[in-house]
Amino acid sequence: AGLLASDYVSPGIDQLFIGRAGVFTDVAARQAFASCVPRQELFDTFGASNSNSGNTSGNSAPGVVDARFVTTDELIYESVAAVAGGRFRQPDLAAAAAAGPLTVRIGYLTPDDRRSAMVRAITQACAPAGITIEDAGADDFAVSSLHAGNVDAVLTGTAGANGSSGATERTGAMFAMRGGEGSNLGDFASGRVDEIVDTLAVDAAPATVLRLASEAEEIMWRHVPTLPLFHQPRTIAVADGMSAVEPNAARTGTGWNMDRWVFRR
């Protein structure tokens, strides 16, 4: 049977989780690395765009994502994202070189041609600043490798998911920044961020979210535990003869309603 493949915009955000040990013990090193990552170029080349994708998530795929504590389809997203102030969009080689020569191992699950190409693009952008990128992708890669110190950064999706990720609500992404959570891949620790996450988990009033999410993003951009990139593009293929498939590019995946699928030979 043949396959009908379609591209979709996922609510999941491709991002770099950055460790706090080894080469990144000092926040200045994390800032330097973030300064050479070409986020705008990565989106332009590899990101999901509504101009060529279906959209099962409701996301508008606005381009480079500048917030972790709100989703891009929330009305307050632009206000919260403004905290980034345009940081880390284009490589700043002077800022990237400020911490001296660095070697950064970026891990991800292979095979993944898109992420392999993204690591190559980061390698080329960071080299002039004296930052050497080592491609640490592997077919048995686990996101726990960052905690174990086997890599310095992980290229993955929302809350460390390798496959479909993200949702229309912000809980998973927020808790990935809370101390002690399994999805907090880089062991980021901030008592204030923990308080903000706990408050936002029970208080969804727009004024509260705007105030606290903006405060959290200020902390995020200073310490750079993650570097959000863009909405992840997903390709979903359906076999000829299969019906009742409802594509879902979020964390539940397309199999969410597989009990209703019908295959006719």
Image (cartoon, rainbow, N blue to C red):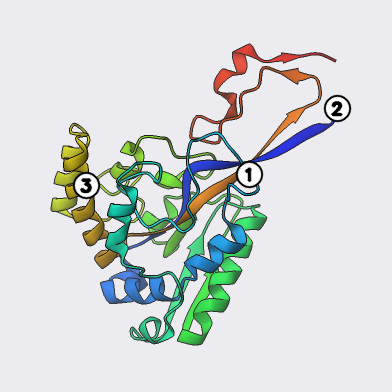
**Location of residue 173 in the rendering, given as x and y in whole percent from the top left corner:** 35, 44
Q: Secondary structure at mark 2?
A: loop
**Mark 3 lies on residue:** 210
Residue 47: where, in percent of width, then height?
57, 55
Lateral position of residue 190 relative to residue 21, left or right: left
> SS class of the residue under badge 1?
loop
Rendered position, 243 above or below 109? above
Q: Is residue 222 left or right of residue 121?
A: left
Query: Would you call the spot at circle 2 few (<14 residues within 10 Å), some (14-19), or many (20 or more)?
Result: few
Q: Is residue 26 visible?
A: no
In whole angstroms, how far apart are the C-alphas of marks 3 and 2? 50 Å
User: Which residue is depicted at the point 24% across and 45% down?
Assistant: 180
The residue that disc 2 covers is 1
Identify the amino acid type marked 2: Ala
Q: Which residue is mark 1?
A: 53
Decide which of tag 3 and tag 2 comes sooner along the chain: 2
Q: What is the number of the mark on residue 208?
A: none
Q: Position of residue 265 (x, y in %)?
A: 85, 15
Of the two numbered discs 3 and 2 in the rendering, the one whose residue sits closer to the viewer: 3
Residue type pointed to by label 3:
Leu
Structural crowding at the residue carrying mark 1, measured as other residues with C-alpha within 10 Å and reported as few (<14), some (14–19) or many (≥20): some
Q: Are marks 3 and 2 in contact (CB under 8 Å)?
A: no
Which type of secondary structure does the marked residue at label 3 adopt? Answer: helix
Image quadrant assignment for residue 227: bottom left
Q: Whole-Å distance between the Cαs marked 1 and 2?
A: 24 Å
**Residue at 59% in and 56% down:** 138
**Residue at 65 percent of width and 22 percent of height:** 245
Q: Quadrant of residue 264?
A: top right
Q: Nearer the viewer, residue 90 or 16?
A: 90
Q: CA distance from mark 1 to mark 3?
A: 30 Å
